[in-house]
């Protein structure tokens, strides 16, 4: 094995320029679509953060199926981004599409229940253990709802989150610790309504002393967590971390909200089932609708009762939880079909096998070229980062960020028909991801590492 190497920045710049040129040559139709789209949308995209792709313009999608999509220029791609988990069930999964199409032709939004809701709630109970469920359109909204209810029933003003967490566009969660351990607004946070230290306490991941310091103030209604961080690279919990979290939340009367939106990749019941976690609320979004907006939050029976008893029927529509499209018939049909027929325990088995193979491919290139990087896997998801050991908290993971290097690796992959998650170096497997898809990545990644370090 070779010794660890530094990145040669001049070489990186030259490699980047060559990839940009290749992209321009290969993608004229996406380029034209982007120019036209720029007339009425900032950066030519329907949501500004879709601009954060590598290369001179975004790739425009023509169609997608399973683990692949084709762009306007007719280029086939293996999709390891999968809509940053929104398409974890694969693109256009047949059973979900059939159920969704059937529901669409019967009407999709009534503000009245359909029978699918009860079945979806039962399926979620089987997966995650909690008995009582409500539905929203996004994981963001499920988190917001759980936070509001937590404040309502505890009468406490603040929530706690992990440093460098991400839980969607929930105002209270854009908080970070600065170098002196103070709570500050996270870099890039847009238009915060109030200073973050008024709403939020921040604790380091894997640090139970820090958590006790925060919870013992008695101000914290809820501790909102991902059981492993997945939005600043993957940061896995220490073996006893979650036992400690549960004990401290119980001791100080803080409700524990586990957001499984990404960590669902750990298995059919997410990390909650795999590690026997005991949340008071559980949030799950993105993937469960099989491609349409759908999310849910579950809670214990006791909590459901406390919440219901605290709300007057007369005020139920103006309390700040809910929405006319939440729990619509289309979302519920999608959840029912996707959980019962697509994201099955058997499918998770295959997805995790592919992820093990993907991780091995990355690790072998890292080893052979002495790249000072590491790769971490969580079930069907894996991610490499630019440090040589696995990070133990968000700040360590953030310190390994290298935007220039990341953009190069992602563009190198894209030019070889591989889509990575743009926000970091993450790959997710869907039920259709094949060994050949994984091999395509392993080969391209090895070539990129060889170009950088060879
Ligand atoms: C853990 C987690 N929770 C919630 C969300 C928010 O999901 P959405 O943007 O679909 O509301 C995300 C998005 O990346 C997430 O990673």
Image: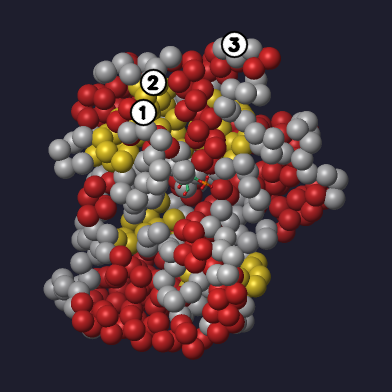
Residue 293 is at least partly visible in this image:
yes
Q: Name the residue under label 3.
A: 309
Using the rendered view, name the quadrant where residue 11 is placed. bottom left
Residue 270 is at least partly visible in this image:
no
Is 354 on the left-hand or right-hand side of 404? right
Residue shown at the point (16%, 73%) measured from the top left: 5
Residue shown at the point (69%, 39%) measured from the top left: 325
| Foreground disc of the pair 2, 3 | 2
Q: Residue 252, percent across and down?
A: 32, 16
**Along the polypeptide, which appears first: circle 2 or circle 1?**
2
Q: How crowded is mark 1: few (under 14 residues within 10 Å), some or many (20 or more)?
A: some
Q: Name the residue under label 2.
A: 157
The reply to whether discs 2 and 1 touch (Cβ–Cβ < 8 Å) is yes
Q: Residues within 10 Å of mark 2 (few under 14, many from 20)?
A: some
Q: Mark 1 points at which residue?
A: 199
CB of residue at label 1: within 8 Å of ligand 1? no
Between 291 and 72, which is closer to the camera in this rendering? 72
Q: What element carries label 2?
A: loop
Label drawn at residue 300: none
**Along the polypeptide, which appears first: circle 1 or circle 3?**
1
């Amino acid at each position: 094995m070779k010794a660890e190497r530094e990145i040669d920045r001049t070489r990186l710049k030259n490699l980047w320029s060559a990839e940009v040129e290749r992209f321009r040559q290969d993608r004229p139709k996406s380029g034209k679509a982007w120019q036209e789209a720029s007339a009425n949308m900032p950066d030519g995209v329907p949501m500004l953060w879709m601009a954060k792709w590598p290369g001179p313009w975004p790739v425009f999608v023509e169609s997608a199926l399973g683990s692949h999509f084709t762009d306007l220029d007719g280029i086939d791609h293996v999709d390891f981004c999968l809509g940053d988990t929104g398409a974890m069930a694969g693109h256009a999964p047949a059973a979900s599409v059939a159920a969704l199409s059937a529901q669409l032709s019967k009407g999709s939004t009534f503000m009245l229940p359909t029978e699918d809701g009860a079945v979806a709630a039962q399926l979620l109970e089987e997966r995650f253990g909690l008995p009582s469920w409500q539905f929203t359109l996004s994981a963001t909204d499920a988190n917001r709802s759980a936070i509001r209810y937590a404040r309502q029933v505890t009468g406490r003003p603040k929530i706690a989150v992990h440093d460098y967490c991400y839980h969607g566009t929930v105002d209270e969660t854009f908080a970070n610790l600065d170098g002196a351990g103070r709570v500050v607004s996270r870099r890039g946070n847009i238009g915060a309504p109030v200073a973050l230290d008024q709403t939020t306490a921040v604790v380091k991941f894997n640090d139970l002393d820090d958590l006790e310091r925060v919870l013992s103030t008695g101000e914290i209604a809820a501790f909102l967590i991902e059981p492993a961080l997945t939005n600043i690279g993957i940061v896995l919990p220490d073996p006893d971390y979650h036992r400690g979290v549960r004990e401290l939340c119980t001791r100080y009367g803080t409700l524990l909200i586990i957001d499984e939106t990404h960590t669902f990749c750990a298995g059919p019941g997410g990390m909650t089932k795999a590690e026997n976690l005991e949340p008071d609320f559980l949030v799950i979004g993105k993937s469960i609708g099989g491609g349409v907006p759908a999310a849910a939050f579950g809670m214990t029976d006791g909590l459901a009762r406390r919440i219901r008893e605290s709300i007057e029927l007369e005020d139920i529509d103006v309390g700040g939880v809910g929405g006319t499209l939440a729990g619509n018939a289309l979302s519920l049909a999608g959840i029912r079909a996707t959980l019962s027929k697509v994201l099955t325990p058997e499918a998770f088995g295959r997805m995790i096998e592919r992820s093990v193979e993907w991780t091995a491919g990355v690790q072998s290139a890292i080893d052979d070229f002495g790249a000072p990087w590491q790769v971490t896997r969580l079930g069907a998801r894996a991610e490499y980062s630019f440090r040589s050991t696995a990070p133990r908290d968000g700040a360590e993971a953030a310190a390994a960020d290298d935007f220039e290097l990341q953009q190069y690796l992602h563009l190198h992959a894209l030019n070889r028909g591989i889509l990575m998650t743009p926000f970091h170096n993450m790959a997710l497997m869907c039920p259709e991801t094949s060994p050949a898809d994984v091999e395509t990545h392993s080969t391209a990644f090895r070539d990129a590492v060889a170009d950088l370090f060879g």
